Amino acid sequence: MQERKYHAYTLQNYKQIPQIRMLTDDQLEAIEVVGRVLPFKSNNYVVEELIDWNNIPHDPIFTLTFPRKEMLSKKHYNAILTLLHAGADEKTIRDKAHEIRLELNPNPGDQQHNVPVMDKIKLHGIQHKYRETVLFFPSQGQTCHAYCTFCFRWPQFSGMNELKFAMKEADLLHKYLLKHPKVTDVLFTGGDPLTATAKILSVYIEPLLGKEFSHIRHIRIGSKSLAYWPYRFLTDKDADELLGLFEKVTKAGKHLAFQAHFNHPIELSTEVVKQAVQRIKNTGAQIRTQSPLLRYINDQWETWAQLWKEQVSLGLIPYYMFIARDTGAKPFFEVPLEKAWHIYRKAYSKVSGICRTVRGPSMSASPGKIQLLGVSEVKGEKVFVLRFLQCRNPDLVDIPFFAKYDPKATWFDQLQPAFGEKEFFFQHHLSVEKEGYLMWE
Ligand SMILES: *Cc1c(COP(=O)(O)O)cnc(C)c1O
Ligand code: SF4
C-alpha cells in the first residue's frame, strides 16, 4: 500500500481544506472564535473520508473535531469575538482564552490526586488510582492525530503546561512498578500514546517483558489512532516496527490490550480501518472499545447498537460506555443520566449476548468509576441504582447503592443519597485526602 501522508489542520491552516468553502460565514466565525479556547485539530483522513460535508453542521464527525458556536457560552464566545473584531493583539487574545479555559473546569475528576510520590519525588507521568492498574502518560504521546471537541484532557494540548502530566523517565516508571507487586496492568495513555514512535514506546514497554516484571500481566494502550489515523498501523514509516513491538509483548506471554476509542460507526466503515484492525489482531493483541455518550454525536440508541454490532463483527470487544466528564464543552455534549441509561438499555437489549461485554453508562468520578444500573422504586421512593465498577477502595466494588432520582442530573456530584440519608455508603470508607496508592500500601 502506498504511504499516506499525514496533514494536520489547525487554526493556522484549516482554510486550505477544499470543503471548507461549503461552510457559512457563521460557521467559519465559530471556528475562529471557539478554536481559540478549545483545542482544534483535524487531519486529511478525517476530513476526506469520515466527514460528510453535505451534512454540516449535523455530521457527527464534523462535530467531533470542528469547533461549533454552541460549544462556548454566549458570554465567552462574545468576549473572544469582540477582541477579534477589535483587532486585538495575539497576547491579549491568548490571555483571555486562558482565563476562559480556567472557568471550564480544566482538570476534572481529581486527577492530580492520583499522582504518586516515590522517594519524595512526585511522579507526574503516573496515576495510580486503582490497586491493579497504573496509568502512564509518556511525554511523547501527549498529542493526538486529531482533537475531540469533548476531550477532558484538553488542557494538555492547549499550552497549559502546569497541568501537563508528562514524564520522560521510563526509569521512574519501571522503579515504581518494581515497588508495587500488586500492579498487574500498565495502561499507556495520553493524548494518544501511539503518536510516539515505535522506538520510544519500546523504551517504555520492552523492559516490562523481563523476568523481574512478572507481576505485570497486561500491557494496555489507550488510543484513538484507529479512528483518526489507521495508517499508523499500515503505511506510517514505523508501522511494521510498532506491530513488531505488539508481537514481542504477546510472544513474551503477556496480554497486549488495545483500548480503542470509537465514538461513531462511521469510524469503523473505511477499508483502511478494517485492515488496520486485522493487522493489530494478527499480532495476538486484543482490541477493546470505549466511548463517551455525546449529544449531537451518538445520543441515539440505534447508533450504539450499530457500533457494538460492527465492532463485534470486526473482532473487537465492547468495553465501556462513559458519561462525558464535566469539563470544556460539557454543556453542549451533556445528556441527563436517566436518558443515558435509556439509550444504553435500549441498545443493549437490541444486540446479542456476544455484544453485551460492554458496561455503562459509567462516570469516572473521584471515588471511582460509577455505573448507573437503572431507575427503580424502593419503598415508594424513586431512586437511581448505582455501583462501583472501579473504586479507590477495591472492597467497595460491585455493591449496589442508591441515589435520589433526579431527571436533570448529568453527573454524580449532582446526586443526593436516597432515603433521606446524610451520605452515600462509601463516604465513611473513603477519605478523599487519602491517595488511592496509599490506601492499599
Ligand atoms: C478506567 C480507568 C482505568 C482502567 O480501569 P479498567 O476498569 O481496568 O479498565 C484505570 N485508571 C483510571 C484512572 C481509569 O479511569
Ligand atoms: S483522542 Fe482522546 S485524548 Fe485525544 S483529543 Fe480525543 S478524547 Fe482527547
Image (tube, grey):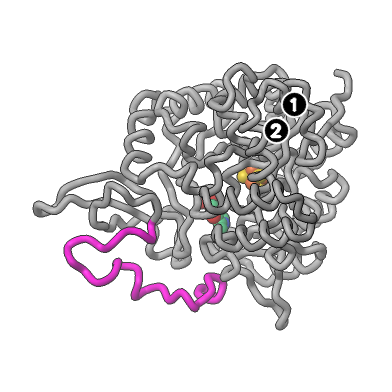
Left or right: residue 424 versus residue 229 is left
- At mark 2, the secondary structure is helix
Which quarter shows the N terminus?
A: top right
Residue 147: percent from left, percent from top: 68, 42
Name, please, the residue furthest toward the front: 86
Span of residues in magenta: 412-441
Above or below — where is 236 with respect to 403? Answer: above
Q: Are marks 2 and 1 in contact (CB under 8 Å)?
A: yes
Residue 45 is labelled as 1
Give the quadrant of ligand 2: top right
The secondary structure making up most of the magenta span is loop
Which quarter shows the C terminus?
A: bottom right
Q: In the image, what residue type sits under mark 1?
A: Tyr
Which residue is under mark 2?
Answer: 228
Q: Residue at x 70, y 56 (%)?
A: 156
Q: Magenta segment: does it hold 439?
A: yes
